Amino acid sequence: MAPHGPSRARLGTGWRHAGALSLLALVGAVYGGSLAHDFAFDDWQLVIDNEVVTWPLSRALDLFDPSSPGISYRPVRMFSYMVDHAIGRGLDPWVFHATNLAYHAAAVLVLYALAWQTIGSGTAAWFTAALFAVHPLGSEAVAYVAGRRDVLAGLFSLLALLSWWSFCGRAGHGAVRVAALVGSLVAAVLALGSKENAVVLPALALLLFVVRARRRSPSSPVAWGTWAALLASAVALGVVVDLVYGQRVGEAVARLRSGPLAPQPALSLRVLGQYGWLSVWPLHLYADYRPPSWPLPTTALDPPAILSGVVLGSMLMLGGLLVWRGRIAGAGLLWFPLALLPVAQIVPYREVVAEHNAYLPLAGLALVAGEAVALLGRRWPRGVLALGLVVVGLLAARAHARAAVWADDETLWSATLEERPESVRAKLNLAVTRARSGRLEDARLLLERARRQVPANLDVLFTLASVYGRLGDDHAAIVAAERAVEVEPGARTLTFLAWANVAAGSEAAARQAFQRALGYDPRNRDARRGLAELRERDRQRRHLRYGRSR
């Protein structure tokens, strides 16, 4: 019987490798089309117009210098863009999308390994990774270059948790255990450098530790060394957050003092509920979850918030019970809301809901589904296998269609406007896209529709004034700029009004507006440049008159 052991081991390894290859093929089939995509939306600011992306790799440490020009926020993500620029020798969208796809495929394989170790079933591990690989709610992070922050944070977070699981399962203080802890900490730091929401990693690590400890024996002694390692790691990550995101943390505290975007706890409960609903029913997805596309609550509690609270409370109770029983599904149930806490509007910010934020939380729900496959498959193996394949197929088809929406700005905002006709953001961005391509009349109509919805939106007014100017309607451009000043008097709006008057040839009005702008901000470079240009025009006119008089 002895020879059969190695053969079974080789067979198991072969099946594991086959499963990994099939997962890679699945990712390619769903997201391969994104290789032909252009840059879209925030890619213009983060990649195309960001000089940091063009830096040589030798300047990587400059990403940590807050005085650096360009956008260096989230340094690991920015470094990955620098690598793409070096590989493609320029801003080749194919390279950027290909690396997004590669990072996502790597995250799928890491989750596959984590599920295999935590669930103990190859079939269940495959379904866990497959659901995560093709869930439509994650398509924004994968098919959109700016979404790389979430893919990288998810990849390194999963790597950190996989190493942590290995650390928790090894006795003693051997070199392998130390290496597992160090690897976990390094991966966690990289996750934080990709996106700050990885700050939840100590809480997720605690869930895995409790699951592993309860599997040994409910009465086993407390592993003080593991507790100490977890606490030390949490402190170390806190230091990293302060070093990398200290300024952002200060801004977040200031926003807390200014109050929430809408009454709490209804806002946070509804945000969490929206993510939960989209995770189980990802049929209607769009790129704008701001008002009026996604209305904010007006009272501290309303029926949708109460329903979300009931569902969330049930998840927490069931998750806690399952964790105490050593079930990874319990950790997955708690993983989902925990990973969403940084984006649940507890700290207010403008992006009320964004699909890319669900990338890491989805891994938790995938573990829940994976353990369900393992348990139910023992009783109904064929039925569970068939149902699982149907679910994966449906999700893959939906994700493939959703990823295609991110092909370019025109496709993205046209689809968003079709799904959400009331979206001001879609009208504005689609107008910018069409103005950029010379379709000025289409842009004007979209912007005027947006202005009727929100007459005080500065972005709409600025863009509309610019389009009017390009159409040759200087009077309308000045009226739109004056309306912007009425909405928010200040250096920015007055400078914009001044330049509108310069374009219309109203130099006296322009000079007055520039001077008013400097009254708000004496260091305003744009206003100073405008006054200097007007003075130069006056000088040239005087010189010309003097020459004629002679």
Image (spheres, grey):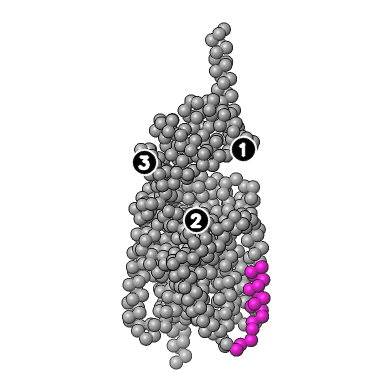
Residue 101 in view of the camera: no
For image coordinates 36% across by 66% down, the residue present is: 396
Snapshot quadrant of residue 215 = bottom right
Q: Secondary structure at mark 3?
A: helix
Sequence order check, earlier mark of 2 and 3: 2
For image coordinates 49% across by 74% down, the residue present is: 313
CA separation, marks 2 and 3?
Answer: 26 Å
For image coordinates 36% across by 41% down, the residue present is: 445
Q: Dot 1, how many residues are within 10 Å of its Cα: few (below 14), some (14-19), or many (20+)?
A: some
Q: Dot 3, how many residues are within 10 Å of its Cα: few (below 14), some (14-19), or many (20+)?
A: some
Circle 1 residue: 520
Q: Is the C-beta separation of discs 3 and 1 under 8 Å?
A: no
CA separation, marks 1 and 2?
Answer: 29 Å
Q: Secondary structure at mark 2?
A: loop
Q: Dot 2, how many residues are within 10 Å of its Cα: few (below 14), some (14-19), or many (20+)?
A: few
Sequence order check, earlier mark of 1 and 2: 2
Sequence order check, earlier mark of 3 and 1: 3
Circle 2 residue: 351
Boundaries of the magenta span: 219-235
- Amino acid type at circle 3 is Leu
Outermost residue to the front: 299
